[in-house]
Amino acid sequence: MAQYYYVGTMLPPLTFDSSLDISFEKLETLLQDNLTQRDYEKTLELRRFYDIVNLRALWKEEELDPRGRLNAFELSEAL
């Protein structure tokens, strides 16, 4: 994994009392534009957690978390 200094400077500080300065959509664009394909695919693996959470939401007919990789149709197809 390369050292991505620009990406690191764009991320907000990690504190509990600070608000996020970057939306998830902007973070996604930032990562796609600045990471190698292999490193970007590693970030997609982290998003599987939200797919698992979304499976539960799908079964309970609740709103899905947009940070997952799969939409409602893709989740139901995967099952």
Image: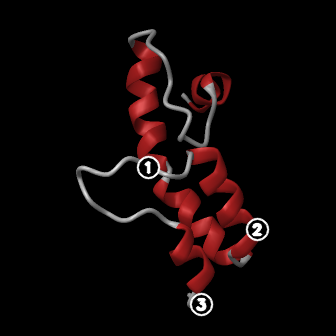
**Residue at the spot of label 1:** 20
Give the quarter of the image for residue 12.
Answer: bottom left
Residue neighbourhood size for the residue with mark 1, other residues' Cα within 10 Å, grouped as few (<14), some (14–19), many (≥20): few
Relative to residue 52, is residue 58 depicted above or below? above
Q: Nearer the viewer, residue 35 or 60?
A: 35
Q: Which residue is mark 3?
A: 2
Task: Measure the alpha-carbon separation of dots 1 and 2.
Answer: 20 Å
Q: Quadrant of residue 30?
A: bottom right
Callout 2: SS = helix
Question: Mark 1: which amino acid?
Answer: Leu
Residue 54, compared with residue 59, is above or below; it is below
Q: Is residue 15 left or right of residue 6?
A: left
Q: Residue furthest right?
A: 33
**Which residue position holds label 2?**
33
Q: What residue lies at 39% left-to-right and 33% top-to-bottom?
A: 53
Q: Amino acid at mark 3?
A: Ala
Question: Which circle marks residue 34 in the picture?
Answer: none
- C-alpha distance separating marks 3 and 2: 14 Å
Residue drawn where x is 68% and y is 75% of the image: 35
Q: Residues within 10 Å of mark 2 (few under 14, many from 20)?
A: few
Separation of marks 3 and 1 at Cα, in angstroms: 25 Å
Where is residue 19? Give x, y as percent.
38, 47
